[in-house]
Each structure stands twice: as C-alpha cells, then as structure tokens.
Image (cartoon, rainbow, N blue to C red):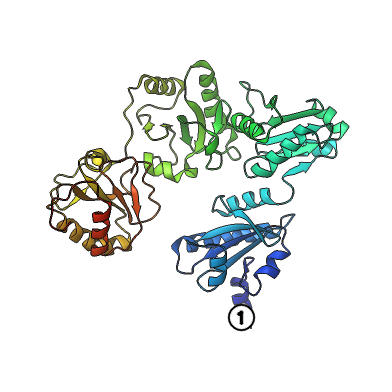
Amino acid sequence: MVFAALVCVAYSSDVVELSESNFDATLGNADLALVEFFAPWCGHCKKLAPEYEKAAAELKKSDPGVVIASVDATVETSLGSKFGISGYPTLKIFRKGVESGPYEGPRTASGIVKYMQKQAGPSSKVLQTVADLEKFLLTEDHALVGVFDKQDSPLAKAFQQFADGSRDDFKFAHSTNADVIEKFGAGNNAVVYVQPKRLNNKWEEARAVYNGKPNSNSLKDFASEKSVGLVGHLTPDTEKFFKKPIIVTFFDLDFTRNPSGAKYIRNRLLKLSTEISSELQFAVANTADFGQYQHALGLKTGETNVAIIGEKAKYIMAKADKFNVDSVKDFAAQFAAGTLEEYIKSEPLPASNDEPVKIVVGKNFGQIVDDTDKDVFIEFYAPWCGHCKTLAPKWDELAKKLEGDSGVTIAKMDATANDPPSQFQVQGYPTLYFVPANNKKSPKKYDGPREVKDMLDFVKKSRTTKATHKEL
C-alpha cells in the first residue's frame, strides 16, 4: 500500500490531460489556458515536459489561476486537425475555450510562468490608490503608466489598445484617481514610460513622457525605443526592440545575485555610449541566455566577450583584448571604419574536395554555394543525427549520378561546426536547401521524399542551369 501511494505521488501532475470528450467542458470554464499539442515520440516534446510540469505547478497557485493542459495529438487526431496542428510541440492560448493565438514565449518553466502571468487578468492594472501606484512602481519589468482625467479620452483609449496588444512585452497600469495623478506628477492626461530600477543610472532619465498623438502604434514605438535606452538589457524577449547593428557585451550578467558586477560593466558602457558618435546600439546580455550566439560566436560562460551583431554579419572583439572602455571604444571605431573582419564559425578548409559530395565549411561557403554558374543542392547535417546517417548513402548516390553534370553541385555542411548564412533556417537535421544559380539570395527548402529518385526529380524540375548529363 505504501508503494502504491508513492507511485501515485510520483506520477501526479498539474498538467490537465485533454481529450475530445473533456476539451470544451474543461477549457470553457477557464479564463486562461495554455494547451500543448504533443506526440509521445517527439524529442522536443520530451525536452519540454519537465519544464511544462514545473510551470503547471507554479501557475496553479497564481492569482488569477492559469490552466496548463496537454493533448496527445497522435491519439486525439480530431483535435489536432481542428486546430491545424502540423508539428510538435505546438502550444496555443485559449480564453474561455476559444483559441486566442499561439504561445510565442520561452519554453522554460520560469519563462512560461512569466509569459502566462502577463496574459492573465486585465492587460492594464487599475491603480485605485497611491499605495497601488507605489507598489506597481517597484516592478522590474519595463512599465507604462497612464494617468487620465477621463477613461474615455482619446489617449486613454489608445493606451488601452496598446496594452491589449503588448502585454507580453511591457507591464501596464492606469488611473483616473485624483490622488494617484497628483502623486505621480505627470499631469492629468499622460502616458509615462518607467524604467526598471535595476537599469536606473545617472546618464539617462528613469521616466519619459509620451508627447505624441493618441495612437497605439505610436505609443508602442515610443515604449520600444525607451526600453532599449543608452545601454539596453538584451534578452531573448527584448531583442526585437534593438535596431541592428548592436554592440553587445556578453558576460555572466545577473542583476539579482550580482548587482554590483552588472552595474560595474554597464556603467562603463553607459559612459562610453555618451562619449562616442556611433550607429551602434549598446547592450549587455547574459551569455547563458543566448545559445544561438554562443554557438555562432564561440562564446563561453565565465568570460566577458564583446560582439557586434548586424542583420547578417557578426564580429567579435579579439580574446586578447581585455574588456575595458578603451578596448570597446577601439572595437567600435574599427567597425565604423570598415576594417573589422567578419566572424564566420568554420571548420578548417578540407585538404581535398574531390569527392562527388562537396564539403562546405564556413570559409568556403561563398565559393561553393554562391557560385552563380551552378545550382547547388546542400544538406545541413549533424554528425550525431540518426536521420542524417540514414540519408548519407542516398546523398552520396545522388551526387554520383550527377557527377558529370557541370551545372549542379551536391554539397553538405556540418551545421554544428560551421555557421550557415542567415537565409538558411536550420532548425533540425538534416535540412536540405536548393540554391538556384540565378537567385542565390532565395534558397528553396526541400521537404519532399528523401529517396534518390525523388531528389533527382526535384533537381530536374528546379534547376536553372542547362543539363550536361544524361541523368537529367
């Protein structure tokens, strides 16, 4: 009996299992719910599962509560079809049983909790007393406060519309209470951006008053600009507000556990940003928050690295240049002068490249893939990937069949050790792209069958060069 009880405890879950029979009844009573459509065999679903469980336990206790649920879409196929599920896991937000949109937040427990708490309740908190105001101003989120003489004024309506559409990005509050308005000191019809206290500094104002027209899009532009500031805190959630190129100092940034360390580095950058004339937007970031940049730039936790991230190109300050105001200033000056060498993560060039499948690395990508005399069919793979190993002999056979055709190249790149250009979205392995000779900027992703005959037919239909081989 004791063993049975322990088993029950071990397998108890705060994630509500949904099926066609209980879907409407369960979600119809929920003000807010997050539903994961998953497949039991999906690796990404398995990775998400423990984080999803933790988030469910935390959100069950929140006020207002949030329902966290899941649907096995391989069993509940009618629900998967009804909601257009085409990949796993897919997460959707529901309000009173009605789908309100996709979940676009982080997939960690803390990220899910924070994202869904912002979705819960009204988009803007009503400040009814001065105490409400003082409590709200303690937030560590980027916040907007609206004070209005009338709730139906044009500015108040625009503010509410802005809040409804941007609750994921900012925290909102408003008031028409005379005492609150007087205490806040911004007038009786204003919208004010309030900087989180952790970012307060002597080089910029902690508050900014909106002086534009009563328009929700203009309010959003204003808030986005102010949230970045002179040296913004770059996170996966705020990255969209930064205009590239960004000069980012990556380090073990933690405003809570090591506020003095964060302030030490950021203050030096703040001072520098006011002293130089540059198109660069300054930012600080926690290295651990940016796995994609760690991979692309070779960043390591425990180190302080400075990088410039543009729309396409990336640059990294030499490891030998220790972080200080002068080294960062010199790095920015080199970028402005156009003398920096673009950082390309790359394996060494292959000693020979005479096999039918051409080996592509970061350093020879342009030479092989961007050759305007050839259509290129390229595989992005991972050495450990089982599907890639299955494809390998077929990819070799395809290349051998086309070896005598001077207008087509079959190639492969280890995408874990090299940095593909941004137009190649590699989110799983293997990923196949056809790059036409006459349009190198618009590669076409191949999602068809991976048998030699099918891939050969695809090349035949897609090629833009003249065939010089009997196979085509």
Would residue 298 be seen by someone viewing this image from the given angle?
no
Extreme bottom residue here?
A: 1
Q: Is residue 356 left or right of residue 132?
A: left
Would residue 18 be seen by someone viewing this image from the given angle?
yes
Query: Looking at the picture, how far across and down is residue 57, in whole percent?
Result: 65, 61
- The foreground one among 436 and 409 is 436
Query: Looking at the picture, how far across and down is residue 378, in whole percent?
Result: 27, 50
Residues packed near mark 1 inside 10 Å, few (<14), some (14 to 19) or many (20 plus): few
- The foreground one among 250 and 90 is 90
Residue drawn 44% across and 34% down?
Answer: 304
Image quadrant in which you'd find residue 442: top left
Q: In which quarter of the image is the C terminus?
A: bottom left
Query: Looking at the picture, how far across and down is residue 411, in whole percent?
Result: 23, 50
Query: Looking at the picture, how far across and down is residue 196, in whole percent?
Result: 66, 34
Residue drawn 70% across and 35% down?
Answer: 144
Image quadrant in which you'd find residue 389: bottom left
Residue drawn 48% across and 17% down?
Answer: 277
The residue at which mark 1 appears reads as 4
In the rendered structure, which amino acid carries the disc numbered 1? Answer: Ala
Q: Is mark 1 on a helix, strand or loop?
A: helix
Extreme right residue here?
A: 178
Q: Is residue 222 left or right of residue 463?
A: right
Q: In which quarter of the image is the N terminus?
A: bottom right
Q: In this view, does 301 lie to the left or right of 409?
A: right
Q: In this view, does 223 lie above or below 434?
A: above
- The foreground one among 274 and 255 is 274
